Image: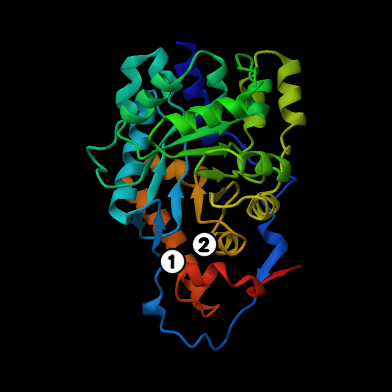
Amino acid sequence: MEIQKRKKDHIDICVNKDVQFDKLSSGFDSFYLEHNSLPEINFEDIDLSINLLGKKLSAPIFVSSMTGGLEQGKKINTNLAKACQKLNLAMGLGSQRIIIEMPESLESFQIRDVAPDIFLFANVGAVQLNYGYGEKEINYIIESVQANALFFHLNPLQEAIQPEGDKNFSNLVSKIDDIAKKIKYPVFLKETGCGISKKTAQILNNTSISGIDIAGGGGTSWALIESYRAKYPLQSKIGETFRNWGIPTAKSLIEVKENTNNKVIFASGGIKSGIDICKAIILGADAVGIAYPLLEASLESSEAVEEKLKQYIEELKISMFCLGVKSIEELKNKRDCLIKL
C-alpha cells in the first residue's frame, strides 16, 4: 500500500542520505552557558526529574515521534519504548493515520507490553480533520495504543511538497480546539521541523490544547526527504529549494514561551547534546525531544538507544553542575547563565 511504502522510504532515506539542514542551524549555538568554577553543590544531589501532566519522569527528555506501520517500524518502536521504560522517559509514536487505512498495521505501534509505565503520545496529522477524521477516529488512535495524550502534528511544508500530500489546511484551528474540548485526553500540537511562530503561538494560546512542541528548524529537513522521494525532477528541485525552510528551534522556543500561558512547551529540532537540552530548558522548554540521533540506535537494539539517551542525560547533568544548579525548576530560572554570542 502507498502509505506503507512512504513510511519505509522515509526510514531508508533518513538512514542512508544526508537529510539535515545544511545552512540554518537550530540556533542554540548562538548562545553559550556561563561556566561556574565554584558551583557549591554536590554533583550527586542534582535531580533531573520533572512532572509531566501528573506523571513523574526521570529527566526532561522524550523520544520524539518517528515511525510505525511496518515491520521495521515495529522494531524501532519496540527498542525505543524499552529504553524509555528502563530510563522512565516519555515517548511519542509516529503518525498513526496508517492504522485507519490498514488496521493490520496497529501492532507496529503497540508497545505497552514492553513499556507499561511510560508517558506515551499517540500521533496523527491535524490536517486529517479535513479529510473525514473526527472524535471517533481520534479516540481510537489514542486508545488503540493505550496512550496518555495525543500529538496533532503540523506539516504543511511536507504535505505541499509530497506528491501524495494532503494540502487542505483550512479552518483547522477551530477543529483542533473542538477535539481538544471533546476528548478526555490532553492534546498537543507539534510541528515537524519548521517551528512555531509568534503569531501561531498567540492563536494556539486561545485554544484548549494542553501543550505545544515547537519542533523547529535546524535538524531533519522533511522537505529534503520528500525531494529524495520525488518521482519527477521538478518535485526534487522544489524539495531542495526548501531544505532550510523554517524558524530556528531556539528562536521559535523564545517566541512561543513569550506568547503562551499555561501550556506545556516542548522543544525539538536539531538537538545535538545535553548542552542543547540545558539551553532549551533555560529558554522555556518543559521537556526536550530527540528523534533523528536515535534512529540508527533504534535499528540496532534497545540497549543502543538506552546508551545514547544516557549520554544526553549525563551531559545535561554535567551542564547543570557547571552552572551550580540542582533541579530542573531551578534551571528554568537561570536565564542570566545563558549568554547570547
Secondary structure beneath disc 2? helix
Q: Name the residue under label 2.
A: 274
Query: In the rendered image, which residue does mark 1 sit on?
Result: 314
Quadrant of the image occupied by residue 163: top right
Secondary element at tag 1:
helix
| Residue shown at the point (57%, 71%) measured from the top left | 333
Image quadrant occupied by the N terminus: top left
Question: x, y percentage for residue 33?
Answer: 63, 72
Q: Identify the image quadrant of residue 297.
A: top left
- In the rendered view, does 57 fall on the left or right side of 329? left
Q: Which of 194 and 314 is in front in this view?
A: 194
Asked if the residues shown at circle 1 and circle 2 are in contact, with their CB atoms under 8 angstroms apart, the answer is yes
Q: Which amino acid does label 2 sit on?
A: Gly
Residue placed at 48% from the left, 88% from the top? 40
How many marks the image carries: the answer is 2
Residue 118 position within the rendered picture, expressed as x and y whole percent measured from the top left: 31, 47
**In the orientation shown, which residue stands out farthest toward the left?**
113
Image-based side of 251 in relation to 137, left or right:
right
Dot 2 alpha-carbon crowd within 10 angstroms: few under 14, some 14 to 19, many 20 or more? many
Q: Which amino acid does label 1 sit on?
A: Glu
Could you tell me how far apart the alpha carbons at marks 1 and 2 are, in whole angstroms? 7 Å
Visible in this render: residue 173? yes
Task: Classify residue 206 as left or right of residue 306.
Answer: right
Residue 195 in sight from this viewpoint:
no
Residue 285 screen position, x and y as percent: 56, 56
Q: Which residue is drawn at 52% across and 39% down?
A: 209
